[in-house]
Image (cartoon, rainbow, N blue to C red):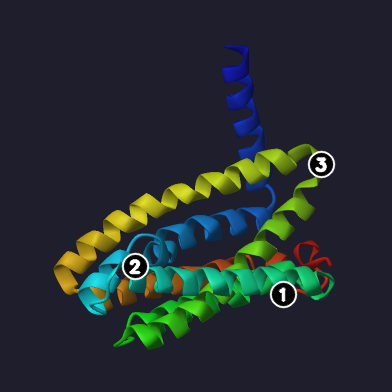
């Protein structure tokens, strides 16, 4: 009982902190958004793409998944090598936009070869957006709230099942290309809205969220 009470207290304290920290609130909203509108395309819909769009087998599906993962790995290595040079909040926003742009291109790719190349770039942009997001959240939270904020960050993954259900309904009604274009365009527009609304906390070079 005591452990359960402590969980709810920590959750309340974490939410209270994030609500009063604009950069952290923006980052968590963006995390939920990309889980709902970007990750479905590369986490749940690739088997559909492989079978129905590209007409390739399980091995071909593996190469699609590996292309995205390889791009993510390259992005993570690049950040580890040049981490001291990045402005976390700016990088998070810029590459979130690039990620959506790559997914919009991927939705129009006519064959697996071109799809793999675009997925590689999408994975790269995804890593270059989400790794700086985690850096920004950890730097801003301080020792006291670090665990609570990262716990909230993990809860953002629950946007994924919502996005998958929405994507499935859209594909059934409009087809793959139109449905994923709608999904990613919505995510892109909302990402830009987050960038504009919290511009003062996320974009200036001197902002705490951009501290090196």
Q: Is residue 15 visible?
A: yes
Choose mark 3 or mark 1, whichever is in front. Answer: 1
Say few, some or many: other residues with alpha carbon within 10 Å of mark 3 (under 14 / 14 to 19 / 20 or more): few
In the foreground, 171 or 81 = 81
Q: Position of residue 101 (x, y in %)?
A: 47, 81
Disc 1 to disc 2, how far (Cα)? 26 Å
Quickly name the residue at label 2: 46
Q: Residue at x 46, y 77 (%)?
A: 119
Above or below — where is 165 with respect to 204?
above
Q: Is residue 196 visible?
A: no
The label shown at residue 125 is none
Q: Secondary structure at mark 3?
A: helix
- 209 sits left or right of 29 in the view: right
Q: Quadrant of residue 149?
A: top right
Say few, some or many: other residues with alpha carbon within 10 Å of mark 1 (under 14 / 14 to 19 / 20 or more): some
Q: Position of residue 10 (x, y in %)?
A: 65, 30
Q: Residue at x 51, y 49 (%)?
A: 156
Quickly name the residue at label 3: 143
Q: Pointer 2 and pointer 3: residues touching (CB < 8 Å)?
A: no
Say few, some or many: other residues with alpha carbon within 10 Å of mark 2 (under 14 / 14 to 19 / 20 or more): some
Above or below — where is 34 with respect to 74?
above
Above or below — where is 151 with respect to 168?
above
Q: Secondary structure at mark 2?
A: helix
Q: Quadrant of residue 139?
A: bottom right
Quickly name the residue at label 1: 78
In the foreground, 117 or 7 = 117
Disc 2 to disc 3, how far (Cα)? 39 Å
């Amino acid at each position: 009982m005591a452990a359960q009470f402590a969980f709810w207290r920590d959750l309340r304290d974490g939410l209270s902190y994030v609500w009063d920290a604009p950069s952290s609130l923006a980052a968590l909203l963006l995390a939920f958004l990309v889980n709902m509108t970007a990750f479905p395309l590369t986490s749940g819909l690739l088997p559909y793409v492989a079978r129905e769009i590209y007409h390739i087998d399980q091995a071909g599906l593996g190469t699609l998944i590996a292309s995205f993962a390889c791009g993510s790995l390259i992005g993570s290595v690049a950040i580890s090598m040049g981490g001291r040079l990045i402005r976390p909040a700016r990088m998070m926003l810029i590459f979130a936009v690039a990620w959506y742009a790559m997914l919009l291109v991927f939705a129009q790719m006519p064959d697996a070869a071109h799809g793999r190349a675009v997925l590689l770039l999408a994975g790269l942009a995804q890593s270059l957006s989400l790794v700086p997001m985690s850096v920004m959240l950890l730097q801003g939270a301080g020792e006291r709230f670090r665990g609570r904020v990262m716990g909230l960050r993990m809860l953002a993954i629950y946007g994924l099942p919502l996005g998958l259900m929405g994507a499935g309904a859209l594909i059934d009604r409009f087809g793959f290309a139109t449905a994923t274009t709608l999904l990613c365009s919505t995510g892109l527009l909302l990402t830009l809205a987050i960038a504009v609304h919290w511009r003062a906390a996320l974009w200036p070079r001197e902002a705490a969220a951009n501290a090196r």
